[in-house]
Image (cartoon, rainbow, N blue to C red):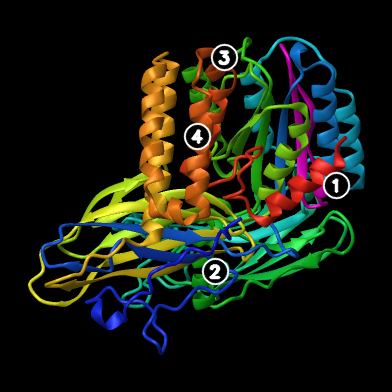
Amino acid sequence: MTSMASYEVLTSAPSSVLDGWSVVENEGGTAVNATSDRLQAEVALDHPVVAFDASELRAVLSVVAPKEQSDQRAPLHLVAVLDKSGSMHGEKLRLVKQTMIFMLRYLSEKDSLGLVEYGSEVHVTCPLTRCDAEGRERLKMAVEKIQISGQTNLSGGLLKGLELHKETPRGTTPEQTVQVGNLYRRLPDDEAAERSAKGEHYGRIEEPPTGCPRVHEWTAAVRFNRPEEEALVQKVIFELHETFRDPVVEVQQPPFQLTRLGWGTFEVKITLHMKDGREFKVARGLLLFWRVLPWCSFHCCFRGLLCGAGELLESCTASFAERAEEMREDRASLGAGNPDVVVRSTFLFTDGHANCGITESDALCAATTAMLNELSSCKSTISTFGFGQDHRAEVLQRIADAGEGSYSHVQSEDQIAECFGEALGGLLSTTHQNVSLKLELAPGVQFDRAFTSFPVEPIENGVKVELGDLFAEERRDVLISLRLPAAQNEALQALGRVTASGFSVLQKRSEHELKPLMLERRAQVPVSPGHPQVERHWNRHLTHDALERGRAAADRDHMEEAKQILDEAIEALGKSQLVIDGDCTSVTLLGDLHDCRADLSTREQYVALGSKKMAMCHQMHSKQRQSPGSEAFVYANFSMQRTEAAFKMGIA
């Protein structure tokens, strides 16, 4: 097996030639590599030296996840949606249940598992439950009670499973914390003047200092997670700046907050008086420039009001510089889409056609997408597992694509455990979420095309490619083509720069790494082979494009057309120097094309097996993510292989 991070890349040129497209450089004049625990960006040009009149260029832009850190990972919230229809009788259901129980060994107390079973009816076998000792036992008992019944209400099961991600995991006591902070609104000048004239500013002086108009409306507040915590408070006292007419204000009823109009910032001192005689004091500097997400100015200050004496978490008297840094970190976390730093996923298992609920493919995928959008920050990935010959691969692949997960064809009972294990191993090694590559082009250079199935969004002077989440050691390689301006002199030319970005679930921070795109122009250039990285991903593009078009033709019952499409791709890959040299990725691509071509021998063979294999291979090679159950391990990381082997050995 070829190492996932072993591809050769082009070293970049000194930043001094970038004409404004500068990067950090080391003493050797090359871009500094990312550290082992961070995202890494890579760039490979098909030809780093081209002639003056060269007008096109292919390149591969890459992002690589760090290796797995065995002592660190984010919590996993997993929901398993299991088919219990009549066709699941016997060995199939027994192995699914045994696999789910075995899975509990790999989930720790910080993880949560939910179970949904579906036949004609949908039932939440166990809500999202923390996998501590008590939770594991509860989950085990729930799995053991699953019994065969009904038809296949796949839509009902999937939508209910996704809905579980909205819930707080069972067994998790909501942290008893109190938040202190303020809301803010800058008043329009006319409203500020009118309210100030009415005396709503509560200031001792009629006129504020020169250049400091009273335009800042703020509300200092104390917030509680639970009503029973708020009920313990007798009153809250707010101590304001001495320039207020009433610098000490007592609030005796919820909501415990205070709104004022003023011209400057200061430290608000807040005292919580509890009904049992306890007192809690905290100081909070007003924040008067939070424009986008006001609620993010609230920070947890107390813990444990319902039991014990309570604990002060922070005094909240940070300087404005420190508070500004907090805001930047908050925005980075929120921009990554997951401030809770939780990996959420849903496993959907079925062995047949959806014949209850939503059965039409487009409607089912639309409902899935709508539910994923509704989940917002609780959005889950979806991995689908189709068992045997009766399920519709096209539907399960589309659902997996919508959920940014993988589709697996489970051919036999003895593959059930290893497929679940391999998928779980990937999730447990998640290092980054919401990963993207941004390409910014220098003047005169034009973007032509991205050969990728990932979403490509135009931006100013370039494009941005959204890549989803990454497991440890995974890489995403985006093949692109560019149009070049003509050159007049021999020189290094700056084509642009690529930035790899993502949110680290281990470090709880956003990460960015920049690499330049540099090209040397010469009057005469000797003929030379292209960069192997570019050829490798051109081969990958040819493969998943042929699989997509061939499957579409076969689905229309145009079997001869499908055979011709795959034959042409097989011929093209067979001529690749990488295949001749035995490159692992390229040889695997060619092997998968041969396997899928063999399953086009008859219509019956295609429906029973070929449609499933082509769907799985297409998604695997287009997304560069191992499909559990595939015999090729070209994209599998160590965690996936290790967990798959453990499940295979542990389930009998």
Name the front one of labels 4 and 1.
Answer: 4
Whether residue 350 is visible to the viewer of this picture, yes or no, is yes
Of pointers 4 and 1, the one earlier in the residue sequence: 1
Q: Mark 2 points at which residue?
A: 326
Of pointers 2 and 4, the one earlier in the residue sequence: 2
Distance Cα–Cα, label 4 vs label 1 = 39 Å
Q: Tell me the element at label 3.
A: loop
* Label 4 Cα neighbours within 10 Å, binned few <14 / some 14-19 / many ≥20: some
Whether residue 327 is visible to the viewer of this picture, yes or no, is no
At label 3, which amino acid type do we have? Ile
Q: Can residue 566 be found in the magenta stretch?
A: no
- Residue occupying the point 35% across, 73% down: 212
Principal secondary structure, stretch drawn in magenta: strand
Q: Where is 383 relative to 262, above or below?
A: above
Distance Cα–Cα, label 3 vs label 2 = 46 Å
Q: Where is 144 relative to 515, above or below?
A: above
Q: Mark 1 points at which residue?
A: 105
Of pointers 4 and 3, the one earlier in the residue sequence: 3
Q: Name the residue under label 3.
A: 358
Looking at the rendering, the stretch of residues picked out in magenta corresponds to: 105-129
Q: Name the residue under label 4.
A: 594
Of pointers 3 and 2, the one earlier in the residue sequence: 2
Of pointers 3 and 1, the one earlier in the residue sequence: 1
